[in-house]
Amino acid sequence: MTPSRSGTRSPPNQRRPTTARRRRQPANCGCAVKVTFCVRGVISPLLANLFLHYAFDVWMSRKYPHIPFERYADDALCHCKSAEEARALWSALQERFAACKLVLHPEKTKIVYCKDANRRGDFPNQSFDFLGFNFRARKTMWPGHIHAHGFLPAASPKALKTISQTIRRWTLHHRSDKALQELAEMYNPCIQGWINYYGNFYRTQLRPTLKRIDLYVIRWARRKYKRLRLQTKGARDWFAKLRQANPKLFTHWQLCHGDGRTTGAV
């Protein structure tokens, strides 16, 4: 027991914490501040947006106002009119990023030739991925029913692989405790989200991947109904009748089996 400032006694576990006085640092103390970025962390896109707005966006608008660009977090596209202009911009960006203590990604940074019906040159890089889309030359139809090739986006192979893995993790064919209507209500929001995002451009690219859901529905039926367990063709016939009777049960049926064909970018 020790006397407190007020003259009363207080037990040791209730002592007032002592506060250390902070010494004022002189203005020219030479202190260094180290900023550490959390790679692949939740806060990474926000930090990248804040820093690159100054390091890239403002700099591009000031130095190269004639070159349009798009940027999302640390991924950016710059639209140049020639290979020479692209190489000059690449060199300038390396200097700019070095001044900002940044480095361009050695593998992802590249010059891509946007080949189409009007640009028929031959360059080593003619496609790229951006925000889940793969941009490359694709068949399209111009006004007047003219078939040609345009430089168009579609869901990238990496994005389609992720969708396929998600469908597999659903293990829909093991949910024999659920009715088909319940399964549709469970998974339709996710399917609709894929169609809303990736279906904005060349949505037919989604068909083969989304049709995998149908194979799991058929496997679900063979586990659910005894009469279909040993009948592969009978299960396929059951699925065809189900789809004709309920064409909107699953969201992707209109795209994969109905009149959901899309030519080119929409």
Image (cartoon, rainbow, N blue to C red):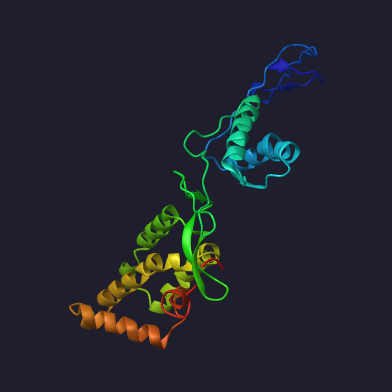
**Quadrant of residue 169 within the rendered picture:** bottom left
**Quadrant of residue 100 within the rendered picture:** top right
**Quadrant of residue 161 within the rendered picture:** bottom left
Quadrant occupied by the N terminus? top right
Residue at 58% x, 35% y is: 87
Q: Position of residue 187 (x, y in %)?
A: 45, 68
Quadrant occupied by the C terminus? bottom right
Q: Position of residue 245 (x, y in %)?
A: 40, 88
Q: Is residue 133 above or below residue 28?
A: below
Viewer-side residue, 161 vs 227:
161
Quick check: 42 left or right of 163? right
Residue at 41% x, 55% y is: 157
Viewer-side residue, 100 vs 266:
266
**Number of marks drawn:** 0
Q: Is residue 94 above or below residue 134?
A: above
Quick check: 74 left or right of 174? right
Q: Is residue 114 above or below residue 145?
A: above
Viewer-side residue, 213 vs 186:
213
Q: Position of residue 149 (x, y in %)?
A: 49, 62
Viewer-side residue, 3 vs 43:
43
Residue at 35% x, 61% y is: 168
Quick check: 105 left or right of 70? left
Q: Position of residue 77 (x, y in %)?
A: 59, 46
Farthest residue toward the left? 230
